[in-house]
Image (spheres, rainbow, N blue to C red):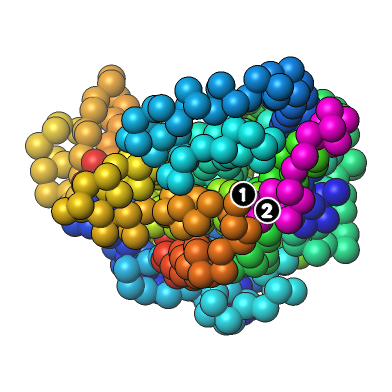
Amino acid sequence: MSNIVQVSNLTKYYGKNLGIENVTFFMNEGEVYGLMGPNGAGKTTSLRAMLNLILPTSGETTIFGKHFEELNKAELSQISYLPGEFEMYPNLTGEQYLNYISNLRSATVNNTNILAERLDLNLNNKIKTLSKGNKQKIGIIQAFMNNPKLAILDEPTSGLDPLKQQEFQNIVQEQNNLGCSVLLSSHILGEIEDLCERVGIIKNGNIVASEQISDLKSKTIKKYEITFNNAPKTSEFKNVKNISKLEFQGNTITLNIKGSIDSLLKVISKFTVVNLRIIEPSLEEIFLTFYEE
Amino acid sequence: MYKNIYLKNLKDMRNNLIYWFVGLITLSFYLSFAYSSFAQNIGAFDELINSFPEELLHFLGASDGLDMSTFGGFLNLEIFGVIGPIMLVVVGINTGTNIVAGELNNKTLELIMSTPIGKNNYLFQQILVMITRIILISLFIWFSFNLFGRIFNLELDFKNFSATIVHLSLLGLFFGCLSLFIGSLTGNKSKTLGISTTIAIISHFINSISPLINSVEKLKYISIFHYYKTSEPIINGIDISDGFITSALCIILIALSFISYKYLDLN
């Protein structure tokens, strides 16, 4: 599997203020990659710098194996982008706007009507009459209407109701099955967990992790719930490594451990264990772990 | 009409151009009718006007005095002195500002620039839109006064009137290019409007006042209004050197706009 996107040491300073620093990640072809981080972490700046909408202070981006500036028109037309602050021309209808964008991309494929039907949107209304959610639907349509090879979406479900958020996820999965790689920036962790195989976590303008969600889960704190026949004393656990949040409730203890559980197994093997439950952390808990550090 | 940037923007300004056309037709009808009404008594009126202090005449845009005995001279005061330049400067500043700073302010530029259109192509097509708009509005002025001049049997020197319209178009184009450059440099709509308007006002005052004060008389050459009207095209026809200087300044500003836009962050 080749890299469709490679971002290397992308740095952007606004005067003396840091936007992003040494942002590095890659996307495999056919992958849905999530970029997570709270507002102001640097997600939008990273996407804009990737697309040369803002000029990076240093670092580079390759897309389809080429530096961004070397991409020809045909290759650029295979990239779609949904900005985080998406606005359109208020006096155009949805259909006119989408035609315009499609023409600027010199696109040969146009799935506008199919997507509009799925998102329950009337394209004949003027944009100035549309609600925030309906405007966002046009943003989603323009991102997928031309069957792009790479879709870069910044907070794509902002303003959508839960039903349409689900429909958006279906569209992303279908487009992904058709060969579209998707870079999804969001602070809605459930959305990323449902759609992405790998994620990058961005904190204060830096990527602090970029890996498979499953790997990320295995490396982070896990919660264990152990029920004993007779609960041991707290002091028995003093030599367990990387333990946190040890709680007793009758004969059941719950504790969090990061990394190896070898020392824990050695301790509990001395007692009669009735039940052992390992609770996988949610992406949200992983995310919070990075932000608490 | 949504094939490219040029056609889309042309369609966008369709209604605006209709309003301009109706407004200019109304204005030209009113002025032509008014002039034809008092044309018989124009001698007394001419005497009154020429008794104005020289400073006031400069402010009215009549550096060589006023000749109200012809319809052209009347228009030189009523249209080409203040109203015409204000109209074209406003159109120029408004159109030039919207190309980059306005679109950025409206948050519509980011997606457009993510398409394969490219920054240079975008700017090129938008400059064509600006030139088209300025030319069309200038043509409306030319057409409407020629039309009502004929209807009311008012003599208007076709060549010199056309020359004045060319000078007026170049003035509007200069401020369009200036606003485009400031917008491409700052990416900020309010800054662009503010700076461009300030330059226009200062430039007008320099041109009006500096010829009256010997010590600063040469300052008039830094005012774009000097190249617009000091040669009095309504009397002398087109001034090639003034036209060349204004055109050259426009080309320089356009070139600088391409350079600054290339390095502008589309935040």
The residue positioned 46% from the left and 40% from the top of the image is B65
Between B19 and A182, the residue placed more toward the observer is B19
Q: Which residues are magenta?
A: B147-164
Residue A153 colored in magenta in the image: no
> Is B109 drawn above or below residue A162 in the view shown?
below
Q: Circle 2 marks a residue in which chain? A: B
Residue B101, placed above or below residue B69:
below
Q: Please, what is the three-letter code of the amino acid marked with disc 2? A: Asn
Residue B38 position, x and y percent, is 69, 19
Disc sitting over residue B234 in the figure: 1
In the image, A107 versus A286, the foreground residue is A107
Number of other residues with Cα within 10 Å of mark 1, as a class: few under 14, some 14 to 19, many 20 or more: many
Q: Which residue is mark 2?
A: B160
Predominant SS along the magenta part: helix
Disc 1 element: helix
Labels 1 and 2 touching (C-beta < 8 A): yes
Position of B151 with respect to A271 (left or right) is right
From this view, report whether residue A119 is shown above or below residue B223.
above
Q: Residue visible at 84% across and 28% down?
A: B152
- Across and down, in percent, residue A19 comes to 31, 54
User: Disc 1 sits on a residue from what chain?
Assistant: B
User: Splitting the image into 4 quarters, where does residue B107 fall?
Assistant: top right
**Residues marked 1 and 2, same chain:** yes
Mark 1–mark 2 Cα distance, whole angstroms, equals 5 Å
Question: What's under tag 1, amino acid-wise?
Answer: Ile
Q: Earlier in the sequence, mark 1 or mark 2?
A: 2
The answer to whether residue A91 is above or below residue B61 is above
Q: Residues within 10 Å of mark 2 (few under 14, many from 20)?
A: some
